[in-house]
Image: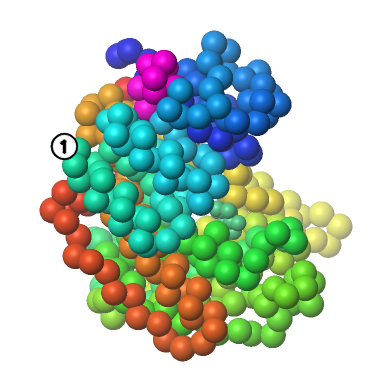
Amino acid sequence: MKNSLRIGVVGAGAMGADHIDRINNRTAGAHISAIIEPDAARAAQAAENAPGAQLFSNIEEAIAAEAVDAVLIAVPGPFHEPVLVPALEAGLPILCEKPLTPDSESALRIVELEQKLDRPHIQVGFMRRFDPEYNNLRQLIESGEAGELLMLRGIHRNPTVGENYQESMLITDSVVHEFDVIPWLAGSPVVAVEVKYPKTNSLAHSGLREPILVIMELENGVLVDVEMNVNVQFGYQVATEAVFEKGLARIGQPSGMQRWRDGEFLINEHRDFTTRFATAYDRQIQSWVNAVHEGTLVAGPNAFDGYLVALSCEAGVKALDGGVIPVEAAPRPEFYAKNFHGILVEKA
Ligand code: ISE
């Protein structure tokens, strides 16, 4: 075993706390050495699961104290850039929860700053690339075994959302995942986005028009539709159907024990993304830690991928008001050319 990687987690909210538990209890070759959180009560609570971790109220203090070898950013998206900049300037490897930043302009600033380093240092936390079923589907598409991919049909359903969930968040907080994983699956970028409204769910809180149907055109001609629904009431579902020239493939169906009882057939369904993507999160963090040990630093979506997602989200938010909105990206710099597959590498 190489030296254990000292990770500083920035933000000890629900996602940060989940990563603290994952890194200290289920990840080889790493531990939490610092919790960077301005809210003292939240920091103290998170520290209970991170014995020996030092507490800091900002990233600059943790860097000055030489308390971290790598940083995991789990604060909300609008606060990413002020953490990414000093972490990049200190040359630290970074795992940044989605989104990279909330808009393409700031994403491009990060991409430009990162290119001053010798290689990419930022991995963006689009964990679906590490889900075993998504990996299987990608391999099937790449293999050509079922012929050409023609269409992808996605469902993305949440049980309910709070009053703070705004209409634009259907795109920026939820479909943001499809904007990363669909081009990765199909091997082709999004070139246009359209949104259609079915009948609105009366159970959605006031002002939220949902569900929506998001239609994405990919450069290679594959057409994608995604039902984005945040009020299904019963559980959490993320599934994809791929339509090929020679057959179909489906991933993300409910799984677990099946029961027949009192005239009913029962099967487990997820209640939220923490269980649906538990394996993906574990594999994402382990692969990142391994990449840092090996010196490649990034084992998944990089900052340029984060910039492309930000562009698609901007188009998606515009498309909420109607029209087919084009997505026009700057060319991918050579610096970001490597195609990361998100396939698990063995534990370090
Ligand atoms: C949440 O923030 C996530 O990232 C989940 O993966 C997504 O399914 C959910 O819709 C978002 O609100």
Extreme-bottom residue of the structure: 323
User: Where is residue 89 drawn, in percent x and y?
Assistant: 29, 34
Q: Which residues are magenta?
A: 62-70
In the shown orientation, is residue 324 left or right of residue 270? Answer: left
User: Where is residue 172 drawn, in percent x and y?
Assistant: 52, 63
Residue occupied by mark 1: 118
User: Where is residue 174 drawn, in percent x and y?
Assistant: 55, 61
User: Where is residue 104 drawn, in percent x and y?
Assistant: 37, 62
Residue sitting at x 27%, y 31%: 91
Residue sitting at x 73%, y 75%: 207
Q: Is residue 230 visible?
A: yes
Q: Is mark 1 within 8 Å of ligand 1?
A: no
As shown in the figure, which amino acid type bears the numbered disc 1?
Asp
The answer to whether residue 65 is magenta is: yes
Residue sitting at x 54%, y 11%: 52
Q: Quarter of the image holding residue 7?
A: top left
Q: Total marks drawn?
A: 1
In the shown orientation, is residue 175 left or right of residue 348? Answer: right
SS at badge 1: loop
Tell me which image quadrant ligand 1 sits in.
bottom right
Extreme-left residue of the structure: 334
